[in-house]
Amino acid sequence: MAATKIAAAKKEAELIELRDLVRQLRLENAESRQAFLELRDQAEQRQRESVKAREIQERHAQADSTQDLTVLKATVAALAQEFGQLRQNLAMSPMAMTVTAATVPASSSIIIVQPGDTLASLAKRHRTTVTALRALNGLLSDQLVVGKQLILP
């Protein structure tokens, strides 16, 4: 009988130890769960902040693009107006484009563009460059008009 009581006491002591261990594990589990929930909340907060920052960045980028587009439109409008004014000035004064003796430098001569003439052929024939012919005659392109007077250097 004494052996049974000793065995029962041992089992009772083991049971108490196991209950303490269960209590300790439950406490650790609760603490771990609390830490997990806090970390999850922090991660969600960071994600919300990241989304908000991205939205702000996109709005700034869109505003910059809109501003750049506005500046570009204004520049195009100004250039179009300037181009129109130049066209108007050219259309209004065809006589001003005619070369006169007063506009020809002393060391230069005047030729009249013939059918088939190009700036390159005229430059080669008169031993000059296309660039020099353009500059001296105020030409913006290589297009020549038959009958137009050109100054040669």
Image (cartoon, rainbow, N blue to C red):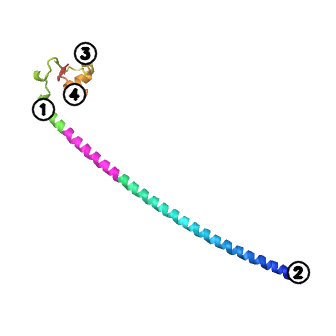
Quadrant of the drawing holding the C terminus: top left
Per the model, the C-alpha gap separating discs 4 and 3 is 18 Å
Question: Residue at horizontal 58%, vertical 70%?
Answer: 34
Q: What stretch is highlighted in magenta?
A: 63-84
Q: Mark 2 points at which residue?
A: 3
* SS at badge 1: loop
How far across and how far down the image is residue 68, in percent?
31, 48
Which is more foreground, mark 3 or mark 1? Answer: 3
Instruction: Kindly check if marks 2 and 3 are in contact, taking CB atoms under 8 A apart as contact.
Output: no
Instruction: Label 3, secondary structure: give it.
Output: loop
Kindly state the secondary structure of the residue where label 2 is placed. Answer: helix
The residue beneath circle 3 is: 127
Between 146 and 128, the residue placed more toward the observer is 128
In the foreground, 24 or 36: 24
Disc number for residue 34: none
Q: Does the magenta stretch include residue 29?
A: no
Residue wearing tag 1: 93
